[in-house]
Every structure is written in C-alpha cells, then in structure tokens.
Image: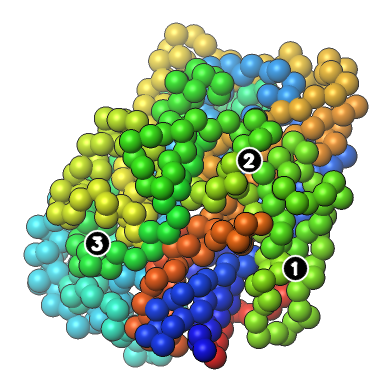
Amino acid sequence: MAKKIVVDPIPRIEGHLRIEAKMNDANVIEEAYSTGTMWRGIEVILKGRDPRDAWAFAERICGVCTTVHALASVRCVEDALGIEIPPNARIIRNLMNATQQTQDHLVHFYHLHALDWVDVVSALKADPAQASAIAQSISPWPKSSVGYFKDLQQRLVAFVESGQLGIFSNGYWGHPAYKLPPEVNLIAVAHYLEALDFQKEIVKIQTVFGGKNPHPNYVVGGMACAIDPNSDTAINIERLNMIKKIIDDTQTFIDQVYIPDLIAIAGFYKEWLYGGGLGNFMSYGDFPETNLDDFKSLLWPRGVILNKDLSTVIDVDPRDMSQIKEEIGHSWYSYSKGSDKGLHPWEGETKPNYTGPKPPFEFLDTDKQYSWLKTPRWKEHPVEVGPLARVLIAYAKGDPMIKETVGMVLGKLQVGPEALFSTLGRTAARGIECKQTAGFMGHFYDQLVANVKAGDYRTFNSERWEPSTWPKESKGFGYTEAPRGSLGHWIRIKDEKIDEYQIVVPSTWNASPRDNRGNSGAYEAALKGTPMVDPSKPLEILRTVHSFDPCLACASHLFDMNGNEITRVTIV
Ligand code: NFE
Ligand code: MG
C-alpha cells in the first residue's frame, strides 16, 4: 500500500497550504494533492460597493504582492467605464509594478526559498578566509572581507549556543539533501541578512508614489499623487533623485549579490532536476508602453505554451468566454448556474460550500472536494503561471534581453535550456526576470523624467469620475502579471454598483486542485516523481512548492481549519 505524507501548513509562505502526497516503497512521490485551507471572501465583500472603491478592498487581499490587486482593479474598472489614463499614470504604475516585482523576487529568493538549499548550521564550520576568497571570485560586491565573514560567523555561533536560532529556527539543518560547502552556506547567510535589510529600501518607491507601503494608494482614472518639480509637497526633483538612487542601488544589488548567489548555489544542485511539472505555461503579459489593449506594446509578452513546445506561442484572450473557466469539481464551492463545465469569470460566482471532514482530521477525501481554491483552466488545460512561464514565453518570442540573460545563466551553469523545466529552472527564471525588472525600473524612471521635463504633470483623468456619466450596465477586465503570475479581475457594474466581481489569482492557477477531468494543478504535477531522502523531513516537497512562491492569502481570497503554528508532518 502506498505510504502517505501530509505537510500542513507549508512554512515560509503567505497563507495556509496543505500538501498530501502518496509515495511508493522507494519513497518517490506518486501522487500529490494541494489544498488551500482557508477562505476569505473578498469577492463577496466587494458586491454592492462603489466600483471606484474596489481597488482599496482588493488590495488588502495580500501584503506580499501588495500593489498588484489595486493595479488589476483600477484597470478593470477603467476598462468597464471606458477611462483613458494620462501617460504619467501609466508610467508610474509600470514603475511601481517593476519595483514590486523586483523586491518580491529578491525577498522570495533569500527569505522564502534559499533555506531549502542553504544549510545555516553548516555555515558554522566555514573557513571565513575561504568564504571571502569565494565571494570575491564570483562578485565585486564590497562586503566580502575575511573579517566580515568572521564577524557574521561569530554572531551565528552566539545564536546557536543560546539555543535560539530565531529567524533560522525549524529548518531541516543537517539534512543529507543539502549539498553546499560550508563557505557557500556562510556567504548565502550573509546575503540573506543583507537582503532583508536592503529590500525595505526598494519599497520606498511605492511610498513616494502611493503614500505608503504595503497597500499604496491608487485611484480610478490615474494615480493619486501630484507631480510638480517646484513644489515642496508634490513629487519634485528631490523625490525623483531619491528614486533614482534607489533604482541604481537595486540594480547593483541584483547584479552583484542575487545573480552571483543564484548561479553559485544552483551550480551545486545541477543534478536535482525534479519538479518540472505540467509543461504548460501562460502569461497575460504586462508593462504596456501605450495601452493595455495594444498587446504589441507589452514589454512582457502574452501567450500560452503547451507541452514544453517553445516553437509555438499560442494567443491567450481572457475576455473570450470560452478560454478561461473556473471549475469547482474538487473545490468547496457551489454554482447556482450549474457547475459541470466551469464558469468564465464574467459569469462567475462565489458561494462557499464546505463538504470536507470536521477538523481535526488525518486525511482529506481527494476523490471529492478538497480545497478552498477554485480550479481555473485555460481551454481545459492546467497551466503554470509565474516567472518561469513569462521567461519561457519571452524566450520563445525572441525577446533579446531575456535571451541574453537566460544564455548567460545557463552558460555559467553549463546546462541546456531543457534544465529550465524544473524546480531549479523556476528559481533561476525568477532571478533572470528580477534582473530584467530592475532594468525596467530605470527605463520607466527615465520616461517619467522626460515627460515631466516636457511640462506634462498630469496624473489623473477626472472625466468619468461622476457615476451619472456611467452606462446603466457595463463589464470590464483588468490584468497584470503579479510576481507569482497572471492576475485577472473581472467586474460587472450595474446601477453604479458592483454587481459581480471575480478575481483569478496566480496562486489559484498554480495551487489548484484536480480539475473535472482529473488533471492535476501545477504544484500537484510538479511534485510527482520526486524522491524523498527522508520523508519525516520533507525538504524536497518544500523545495518544489516554494519554487512557485505560493501565496494562499491571494489564492483563496478567515477560516483556518488547523490553526497550527508549526508545520505538522504526518507519515502513514
Ligand atoms: Ni499574495 Fe499574489 C502575487 C497575486 S498570488 S502574492 O504575486 O495576485 O499568487
Ligand atoms: Mg476568485
């Protein structure tokens, strides 16, 4: 009989995710099931409200990918009401989005994922002189002296001797699947702490344009900030200079710390090529240089790749009612309109209907409904969204910068493009993309400054602010590519109020349960075939699930069935 393993909740993610897996006698995962264990109901809360307020509620879905739900929401309402925003608003939104992507990817790599590959306790055995030599051989980053690594190691020793590992507690330290030499572990721990400090600088850009972070302010019709180079209170030269300095520092950090670390760490795990999964990828595209319907102007291209076939990128149209549908055959929801085929978000509804066991329980009945996530599918295909999808689509479409960075990373690792279809490929794609978005920050900054120098200070179009100017009924779609992947908001407005609001989130695509045809979601597919060295310490499950950067707060948009603070691993 197959052995079962349950990891609940998965640590170092946002929200509550449970993985059940079946292993064979050799401890290789044969089947995996992904469960979102909380429900939040933001879609329901939005009904009946003023559509101009939707962004403020939707943005509270998440403080990790903060900004992105506000962006998708204002785009969706503007689409419904036919509002064109001024160029400065488009540029500022692009700059804030690029800032969010860059900061989120950096935090993910070091703080949410690196410890699946880096053994903190092994760093105690490192020779600081050797660590310094390695650091200097891979990067010109100045914090690399012998003394620097010595001091850090002494701090770590003090942590361990006090029995309190603090932010490093509860790791699977000493697990045989860790492969880095102690010196590389020490370098990675140093950069974990540096990145933790530095990431807070990056988000200051959100506070300049949005007043605060997390949850910066937006407005339907533009951005809620004033530009005036000669004013003390508006966005002026001093603020713009501050932003420029942050962008320059960010690009340096990505080039001199993140990318060299990614290559150094991945180089020791080249044989660990599990976790590829579906082989189907989707992106809506983002970063419009003109407007959102001018797909050719998107700096991140849109499309779908099926079965790892990089020779063909298929068009995706989230407005087409036949393409994207949310099924609920394995989800704790009901559809009053009939559930067999799933519903496009413009005809969608959110009616929770929990049919699972009463907690506490050991296993879910995965033949039935087993998740608070709906099951989005593109033309009935499960697809993976996120950095790997975007990088592959850009690569397949011949984007010169992505081709160059992918070539550089693969060349340094001495692996071919097929290595991208893996857990490590997903992690590498995030770094590759982060270098690109750090570049976008500079690009949009230059655009903004050029516009302001030309005398254009406009950030807001008030033409359609008054509800009396709106049609009696309308519908809209707003999209963005959030750090974790394709994000869509679909709205129906009736008599000046929100009649229906549906959100399909990146982590819902990736973490979804089985669909009505029995096909796995992206996490489920990626875990299949993974050998577990020690199932009581399921490091391999964490590696692959973390490589998607799960956010269940987004995905299940307060109900916690378990309430466990510490991960429970059950093996039967
Ligand atoms: Ni809460 Fe999010 C992102 C969105 S979910 S993190 O990125 O939308 O996948
Ligand atoms: Mg939804």
- State the residue position of label 3: 266
- Image point (43%, 12%), residue name: 453
Query: From the viewer's perspective, is 223 left or right of 113?
Result: right
Q: Secondary structure at mark 1?
A: loop
The outermost residue toward the right is 495
Q: Quadrant of the C terminus?
A: bottom right
Coordinates of residue 523 in the picture (x, y in percent):
50, 62
* Mark 3 surroundings within 10 Å by alpha-carbon count, few (fewer than 14), some (14 through 19), many (20 or more): many
* Placement of 314 over or under 260, stated as above or below: above
- Give me the C-alpha separation between circle 3 and circle 2: 35 Å
* Mark 2 surroundings within 10 Å by alpha-carbon count, few (fewer than 14), some (14 through 19), many (20 or more): many
Coordinates of residue 44 in the picture (x, y in percent):
81, 49
Query: From the viewer's perspective, is 328 left or right of 471?
Result: left
Amino acid bearing label 1: Phe
Residue sitting nearer the eye, 208 or 74: 74
Q: From this viewpoint, is residue 197 visible?
A: no
- State the residue position of label 1: 559
* Placement of 149 over or under 437, stated as above or below: below
N-terminal of the pair, mark 3 or mark 2, is 3
Q: Secondary structure at mark 2?
A: strand
Coordinates of residue 504 in the picture (x, y in percent):
64, 46
Tell me the quarter of the picture where residue 325 sits. Answer: top right
* Mark 1 surroundings within 10 Å by alpha-carbon count, few (fewer than 14), some (14 through 19), many (20 or more): few
- State the residue position of label 2: 324
Query: From the viewer's perspective, is 310 left or right of 205?
Result: left
* Placement of 66 over or under 368, stated as above or below: above
The outermost residue toward the top is 454
N-terminal of the pair, mark 3 or mark 1, is 3
Residue 192 tag number = none
Coordinates of residue 355 in the picture (x, y in percent):
79, 70
N-terminal of the pair, mark 1 or mark 2, is 2
